[in-house]
Amino acid sequence: MRRLPFPDFDDIAGVDALVDNTRLGSYPDLQAFRQALKDGYEQYHNAEGNAQAVLLVPIPDPSGDWLRKHYKNPPTSHLPINDIREDGLALPCSMCGSSHAFSLDHVLPKEDHPAFAIFSRNLVPACYCNLKRGRNYRGNNVGARTLHPYYDACMDERLYAAQFSGMGKTARVGLQILVADIHPEKTAIAFHLDNIVKPTGVLNWMRKRWVKFVRAPRKIVGSLDFIPANDQELFAAIRDHRDGRDYAQGSPNNWESMFAEGLLDPTVIAWLLPRLSADGRGIDDPVIAGLT
Ligand SMILES: [Zn+2]
């Protein structure tokens, strides 16, 4: 997941161009919704994309369905949507932090919110996670909602870390929330973790990463190219690696950084240090002696 700048597209002008386009099958049906769409976009923006505060704009089918179809095949007025899609491809997923977005998908699903099917500020580069969560974008508790890459500044904060236990050739892995309970978006951060991030397979990825890490720590954390003499040296090396992943992925909330942040936990450092600095260990040797 990562914070994004607003797309460079004039959605209000786009509404006029769309509903007045006589060549489209949606003409003249969509003419009746010109103002409702504009008001809806404005309300969405004023509510900062908050999934509990954005109001439903009722657009019954077939007009609602036309808007969904225009998302799949943008008319001339909305061709810049294709540029936004291309611009986000193969970059880190803005919703879950995996390394590869492959689509431009909806924050508020088009099935429930056809009015926002082609609203650029409802469209974000995402991976399989967004298909998997489907129409799950808010909970019943106050503040329980998905985070929004265009509006939630907290996506620039380090929100999550791996949590390792039972360390050995394998490890049990969970994900923990790093922000304090008093954080104003704590409920949304927790909802996003449980409903967007965790269902992606991130825990499976973390478990497999651990297995590789203990076999070849330097290949996973390149800065471990020396034998650490103490906790501070080990911590600093892993932190450098984490900071590099933050930069490369454009966010502290990518899977590589979440993994590295988990390694920085004092219990993991205390487990790693005596093994990495064991007598006779070379920098390319495994964490656990004899592991191949
Ligand atoms: Zn994703």
Image (spheres, rainbow, N blue to C red):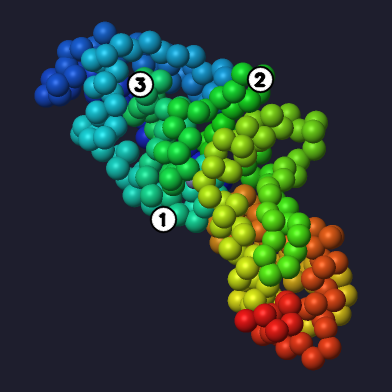
Q: Amino acid at mark 3?
A: Pro
Give the residue number, with chain letter if any, for mark 2. Answer: 141
Which one is in front in this view, the residue at disc 1 or the one at disc 2?
Answer: 2
Against 233, residue 208 (above or below) is above
| Crowding at mark 3 (Cα within 10 Å: few <14, some 14-19, many 20+) | many
Which circle marks residue 90 in the picture? 1
**Quarter of the image containing the C terminus?**
bottom right
Against 38, residue 130 (above or below) is below
Extreme-bottom residue of the structure:
280
Classify residue 51 as left or right of residue 56. right
Disc 3 within 8 angstroms of ligand 1 (CB) = no
Give the residue number, with chain letter if any, for mark 3. Answer: 114
- First along the sequence among labels 1 and 3: 1
Under circle 3, the secondary element is helix
Q: Is residue 3 visible?
A: no
- First along the sequence among labels 3 and 2: 3
